[in-house]
Image (cartoon, rainbow, N blue to C red):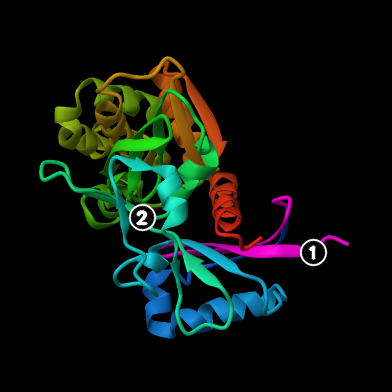
Amino acid sequence: MIEPAFVAVDWGTSSFRLWLVDRGGKVLAERRSDEGMLAAAKAGFPGVLQAHLAAVQASGDLPVMICGMAGARTGWVEAGYVDTPAPLSTVLKQAARVPGEARDIRILPGIAQRDAKAPDVMRGEETQLLGALGLDAAGEALVCMPGTHSKWVRVKDGTVAHFSTFMTGELFSVVSRETILSLAVAGADEAEDVVSFKSAVKAAFEAPAFAANLLFTARSRQLLFGGAPAAARETVSGTLIGAELAAGLSGAVPKAGITLIASGRLAALYRQAFDALKVDVSPIDADEAVRRGLSMAAAAIGTK
């Protein structure tokens, strides 16, 4: 009989994901909700976690390994940061234990870039890096991690050397809902317009300084030449992603190309974007990466 070994949790700002995992890394049960840090801070982190543990029938002796915003200053228990240059192995060693809980609950630290010219932080992505690259990865890797706040990370011999955050996903949400462009994208269906998307990616990549102008063409082109709301939406998305890629690819690109850690629609969008620029990528599923990273953390501290 297959028995669970530990519980893995990715606790973001607005989302909660939990997996019941056996010793071999197989997922036995899964829970997802919108009870991220913001909601859990109001409802209470212990209660939210316990409700999901009960739903998957996790026994009281199963340890829980958490990554993400639960470890932020405004989260459950502050897990602190590992400063760059940050060996990924150090992340495993600095998990914070949640006090006052009968169950062994640990939260992994984030990574901080204390550079006055380029200050930056990440929480959760370090665990995806662990799962995607491992601890013994030799050489250099340039990793793109799309999301509400996309991360571009340079890793050398298992150490995070430098990273940059781009508010691409959040900007897309704001621009498409709170600006004049909301009129252009109103009523857009789920149909993809790959041609419009790739065209916008290339235009913004080639002239990122004109990104604000290129965004407005989603409206002006529709007014003057017609076009479906979906085309306007893809223009907005492609412009923002193209500008991000212009910055992310501005430095040296390793011979192996880009490691893309993403899931779902974001994975498909970014693969199309890289394809438009003829840049090679090695895709890794983000969910699998974070689970693998949490499994490594659980093994490192002896919870399984």
Q: CA distance from mark 1 to mark 2?
A: 30 Å
Q: Give, as a three-letter code, the residue at label 2.
A: Gly
Query: Does residue 124 lie above or below 158 as drawn?
Result: below
Q: Nearer the viewer, residue 64 or 265?
A: 64
Taking the image as drawn, is residue 122 in sight? Answer: no
Per the image, is 13 magenta? yes
Mark 1: which secondary structure?
Answer: loop
Q: Position of residue 146 (x, y in %)?
A: 40, 42
Q: Position of residue 262 (x, y in %)?
A: 49, 41
Residues packed near mark 1 inside 10 Å, few (<14), some (14 to 19) or many (20 plus): few
Q: Residue furthest right?
A: 1
Instruction: Describe residue 58's horizontal placement relative to residue 143 as left or right.
Output: right
Q: Nearer the viewer, residue 268 or 186?
A: 268
Residue 214's label in the rendered image is none
| Residue at the (33%, 27%) spot, across then down | 201
Residue 3's label in the rendered image is 1
Mark 2: which secondary structure?
Answer: strand
| Residue at the (56%, 53%) spot, across then down | 300
| Residue at the (54%, 49%) spot, across then down | 293
Res 297 quadrant in image: bottom right
Q: Position of residue 278 (x, y in %)?
A: 42, 15
Q: Earlier in the sequence, mark 1 or mark 2?
A: 1
What range of the chain is rendered magenta?
A: 1-26
Res 37 quadrant in image: bottom left
Instruction: Describe residue 110's horizontal placement relative to residue 89 as left or right.
Output: left
Instruction: Describe residue 184's horizontal placement relative to residue 192 as left or right.
Output: left
Per the image, is 138 magenta? no
Residue 110's label in the rendered image is 2
Taking the image as drawn, is residue 251 in sight? Answer: yes
Q: Give, as a three-letter code, the residue at label 1.
A: Glu
Query: Does residue 99 lie above or below 92 as drawn?
Result: below
